[in-house]
Amino acid sequence: MPIDFPNSPANGATFSAGDKTWQFDGVSWVLVASNASIGNSAITEAKIADGAVTADKIGSLAVTTGKIDSNAVTAGKIASGAVTASKVGSDVNVVTVCTSGTRPGSPFTGQAIFETDTNRMKVWLGSAWSIGTAHINTISIEYLVVAGGGGGAGGGGGAGGYRNSVTGELSGGNSSAESALSIGVGTHTVTVGGGGAAGANVGSNGSNGGDSVFSTITSTGGGGGAGGTFQQTRNGSNGGSGGGATSYATNSAASGGSPTSNQGFSGGSSSGGLGDYAAAGGGGAGAAGTTVNSVTTGGTGGLGGSGLSSSITGSSVSRAAGGNGYWRTGGGASASNSGNGGHGKDTNGGGNGYAGGAGVVILRYLTSTINGTGLTITGGSITTSGGYTIHTFNSSGSLVIT
């Protein structure tokens, strides 16, 4: 069927008929697009010479959306393996997607690849592949987040909440380790909870410790130990671990503070006879505070619950123990950044107990994770151990990934 082309067309004008399109080049009409001209598997490896596709052979705007009919070039029309690295000239910028085990067998100098199993972009240097640049958008970070311990009074203060994601270790309340976090580029606030202030042996409860926070992880401050009121009972305060209770010159019983789930244990309860003082220990991350009955203990306070150990820094350190109750030797101030509950007053007579220990936030990641990425991570006190980089925050700050 003859084609009736327009008369006196302008240079560059196009004309379509059926599934074909022509363009006037100033002299004649040239066929530039045809769905029918490309059959299934019409483009094969044998039909493309090595180096046939080069930058200088593709004119500016030669291939545009308007010049390619819908579905003109489909997967079904290009035979498997038809377009290979050897068919593309080295002056055309392409990236071959492969794995570290399926790299091109005969690469040209400057050829770029992306390995899906290592997430690295590499270049053939003529005799070997470059080490490459890793491309990641998140880093897996393990954490130990310990809140501030509750202040002691008569009853011992509860330990700060204890959350741990180190594989093979325990989290608070003797629960299983939590999952590591995936953290991306940016500034991530770290809050380290302070220890709760001491209360009075005969008077007010100790204060709760402050929460410690990193990303979505919040550890709750330890509950304050109970103060004492003559011929009354007083419950320990709730917290990460609960504060110890007191009973003063009464047969009635008091309850230890309740813990936060999977962060610690309850404080000990108390009861006693007339004229006696019973002060229970605060709960710890690894055990409940000791319950006390002054008839059987003679007024000596209960022991605080044990803490838990972690080797996140490379050395095993125990943290988050509950404070001892009143008139129990071995009291004194809590260690800094231990998350321990404060002890009750450790000698006979009126007066204050001891403040709880401040918390701590410790983060670590495999050093190899960021090697070759160009990423920089700052914040806290930075150390290394066993292939890990460790950031320890003894006070509030930020983990900055750039």
Image: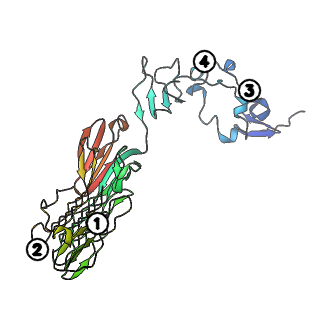
Mark linked to residue 50: 4
Asked which secondary structure carries label 2, the reply is loop
Residue 53 in the image, given as x and y percentages of width and height: 60, 24
| For marks 4 and 3 on the same chain, the one whose residue lies earlier in the sequence | 3
Question: How many neighbours does mark 2 have within 10 angstroms: few (below 14), some (14-19), or many (20 or more)?
Answer: some
Question: How many neighbours does mark 4 have within 10 angstroms: few (below 14), some (14-19), or many (20 or more)?
Answer: some
| For marks 4 and 1 on the same chain, the one whose residue lies earlier in the sequence | 4
- Residue annotated with mark 2: 351
Residue 277 in the image, given as x and y percentages of width and height: 17, 74
Q: Is residue 305 left or right of residue 368?
A: left
| For marks 1 and 2 on the same chain, the one whose residue lies earlier in the sequence | 1
Q: Is 13 located above or below residue 42 in the figure?
A: below
Q: Residue furthest right?
A: 1
Nearer the observer: mark 3 or 1; the answer is 1
Q: Are marks 2 and 3 in contact (CB under 8 Å)?
A: no
Nearer the observer: mark 2 or 4; the answer is 2
Q: Quadrant of the N terminus?
A: top right
Q: Residue at x 52, y 17 (%)?
A: 106
Residue 141 in the image, given as x and y percentages of width and height: 36, 46
Question: How many neighbours does mark 3 have within 10 angstroms: few (below 14), some (14-19), or many (20 or more)?
Answer: some
Q: CA distance from mark 4 to mark 1?
A: 78 Å
Q: Quadrant of residue 17?
A: top right
Nearer the observer: mark 4 or 1; the answer is 1
Q: Is 248 located above or below residue 142 in the figure?
A: below
Residue 275 shows in this picture? yes
Q: Residue furthest front?
A: 296
Asked which secondary structure carries label 3, the reply is loop
Mark linked to residue 41: 3
Nearer the observer: mark 2 or 3; the answer is 2
Asked which secondary structure carries label 4, the reply is loop
Q: CA distance from mark 2 to mark 3?
A: 92 Å
Q: Residue at x 41, y 35 (%)?
A: 134
